[in-house]
Image (cartoon, grey):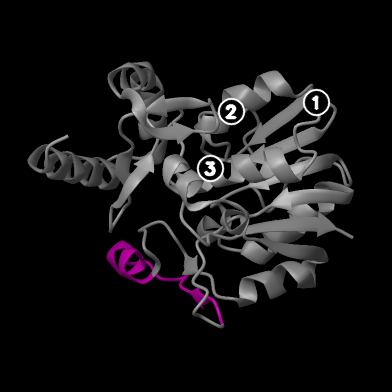
């Protein structure tokens, strides 16, 4: 794809991301996905989620666009592809007998998980993919109910994030696992909290997105431990060769917080 056309596409993507709601974008992207998959079929990149290859991955990002971020086939981002690889290679997540709670379900996983698991529950206040509309700070589930909870890039949107962490801990079974990815700056010792900042432009500047309420620092893991979790920082790309990282278009060194209820 020519550089001029690529730059034009990047500008269009950036405008769309900031102009339309996430709920609307999810609905539109589901309609466009089959078209994207056909147009961008090729051999430059591979999406491990559907195991298909493509000539092009879209740029993506609210402020600074990341090259080769969005897969045209599943609409997965780097973190989704990394998580898929980790769950497949390092965990028993895909055991169909596992009882899964997926908060704010990602569309790249939704249909696959729905077919895979006998018990797959989706939950969110606003997502069109969520079957149960509920507040993460007041989950309508019993204690010790789920083997896995997926809650990725949600806590930065939640006013009382520590209460949400306690709710996730509560509904997990003993020795159950939670994947709790968030935007985190490992150079920060402490989280910069802006939950009471009303100015969306300021939040965008401080936290990288207008609807984020904070940017987490290294104390994020301490918050999870305080709730009761055992926390393992997974560096999955360290176990991979450079060619695979490029082929799957992953962010080298990205961390997956893997939490266990103890």
Compared to residue 99, the image places residue 150 above or below, namely: below
What distance separates the C-alpha of mark 2 from that of mark 3?
12 Å
Q: Which residues are magenta?
A: 190-206
Closer-to-camera residue (111/20): 111
- Where does the C terminus fall, quadrant-wise? bottom right
Residues at marks 1 and 2 touching, judged by CB atoms closer than 8 Å: no
**Residues marked 3 and 1 touching at CB (< 8 Å):** no
Residue shown at the point (51%, 38%) measured from the top left? 126
Dot 3 falls on a residue whose secondary structure is helix
Residue 106 found in image quarter: top right
Q: Furthest-bottom residue in view? A: 189
Left-right relation of 113 to 96: left
Reading the image, the residue beneath label 1 is 96
Quarter holding the N terminus? top left
Q: Which labelled disc corresponds to residue 133?
A: none
Across and down, in percent, residue 61 comes to 33, 51
């Amino acid at each position: 794809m020519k550089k001029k056309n690529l730059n034009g596409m990047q500008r269009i993507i950036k405008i769309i991301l900031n102009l339309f709601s996430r709920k609307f974008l999810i609905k539109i992207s589901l309609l466009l996905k089959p078209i994207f998959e056909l147009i961008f079929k090729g051999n430059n990149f591979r999406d491990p989620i559907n195991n298909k290859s493509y000539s092009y991955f879209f740029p993506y990002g609210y402020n600074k666009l990341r090259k080769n971020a969005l897969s045209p086939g599943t609409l997965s981002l780097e973190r989704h592809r990394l998580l898929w690889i980790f769950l497949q290679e390092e965990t028993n997540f895909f055991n169909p007998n596992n009882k899964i709670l997926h908060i704010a379900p990602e569309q790249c996983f939704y249909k696959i998980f729905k077919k895979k698991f006998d018990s797959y529950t989706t939950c969110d206040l606003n997502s069109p993919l969520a079957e149960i509309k509920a507040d993460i700070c007041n989950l309508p589930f019993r204690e010790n109910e789920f083997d896995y909870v997926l809650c990725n890039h949600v806590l930065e949107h939640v006013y009382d994030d520590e209460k949400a962490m306690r709710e996730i801990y509560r509904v997990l079974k003993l020795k159950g696992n939670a994947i709790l990815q968030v935007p985190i700056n490992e150079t920060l010792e402490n989280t910069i909290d802006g939950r009471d900042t009303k100015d969306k432009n300021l939040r965008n500047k401080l936290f990288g997105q207008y609807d984020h309420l904070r940017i987490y620092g290294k104390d994020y893991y301490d918050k999870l431990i305080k709730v009761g979790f055992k926390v393992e920082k997974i560096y999955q790309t360290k176990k991979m060769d450079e060619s695979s990282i490029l082929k799957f278009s992953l962010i080298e060194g990205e961390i997956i917080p893997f939490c266990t209820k103890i």
